[in-house]
Image: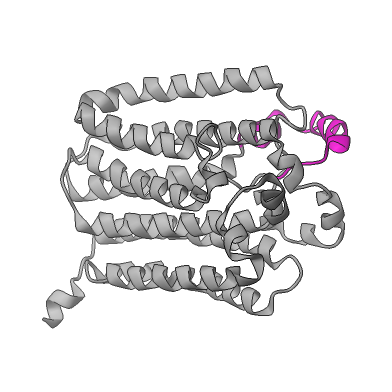
Amino acid sequence: MGGTESVSSSQISGKANKTEKVSIFRKLNLIFRFSYTLPFFMASVCGVLFAYVSLDVPAYIAVLIPVTVMFMALFVNFSNDYYDSISGADDLRFQGWDEHKAEGLESSPFLEKLYWDGNPVNNGLVTAKQAKIIMVALVGISILLAVPILLYGNLITVAIFGGFGLLIAFFYTAPPVNLGARGLGEIAVGVSFFLMVFASYYVASEEVWNYEIFVFAIIVGLMVGLMRTADSMSGQDAHIQSGEKSISVRVGLDNMHKVIKAILVVIYIVVALMTYFDITYVLLFLTLPLAIKGWKLMNAKPKYWEVFMAPLTFGIAVFTQFLFVIVMIVQMYFTYDLFGALF
């Protein structure tokens, strides 16, 4: 969701010719933007791994749920690109991007990984007809993978969590809902990722309630919602021209540092609350250097600060998910209830 780079129509043919010279793996990455699939996949891994460590969960379910979510994420990201191409949003968003790069934006390797060579429909990698076929194929694969999960869990629960989460993510840009254009995009992303974590656990555990993973799901929802909020700032002019009401449009770019800082403070308060369940969650604070770097960037507000905030928030979200996996591994061998010991 978001994080898409495009080019003006006059640059499309040049981009297409350039991509013909790269490997098939690079082309696939340009089409499916696997880097933006990672947060989806890891969100599900966190939920399933918590269930696997805490309860007796079949290994095939622990593997199948994240894989299913990954294909759903591929569909969501690709469909967002398709509808952004149809609406013209991506053309507006990154007109003149090559000129910006010439001014120094390409100096960040992380930024280059996040903003690749363009919307695959816009730059000619796939036609509109091929894009529709790809979307149908991705939905079909997701449904096939979900069948064993449906048989394993409660049909209604799986359908509600999975269907609701997918619809929220899909209608982020898809008409007629287009949540992103109505000022609900960032909230929709946060809710969707909260569901990915908690629903993955809840389905895998066969509906065993747990506050610990519920709180962590809130953290992931806030972090990925923040990632989307920061990412949308780089398309401020395009959002305004398209009449979209993102948070940055409503608040104004000059005031967005206040919004981002407030969200960061809330995130780390909730991270601190996680130590109530186990002291090993202190490892989640290892993302603080990235948060501090972003904080300093917002204070300084150099040119393109709003663009450089996107990879920083992306890093915070994904790094937190990887740290949670490490915490789960640590907890297999070491647990300590800090508050239980004190009180």
* Horizontal and vertical percent position of residue 107: 77, 61
Residue 25 seen in the current view: no
Give above or below for 294 relative to 149. below
- From the viewer's perspective, is 34 left or right of 196? right
- Residue nearest the observer in this picture, 34 or 60: 34
- Toward which corner of the image does residue 282 lie, by quadrant? bottom left
Quarter in which the C terminus is drawn = bottom left
In the rendered structure, which segment of residues is drawn in magenta?
A: 5-32
> Is residue 188 shown to the viewer in this render?
yes
* Most frequent secondary structure within the magenta stretch: helix
For residue 168: magenta? Answer: no
| Residue projecting furthest to the left | 343
Nearest the camera: 317 or 77?
Answer: 77
Residue with the most extreme front position: 243
Instruction: State left or right for residue 245 relative to residue 22.
Output: left
Q: Position of residue 173 (x, y in %)?
A: 56, 38
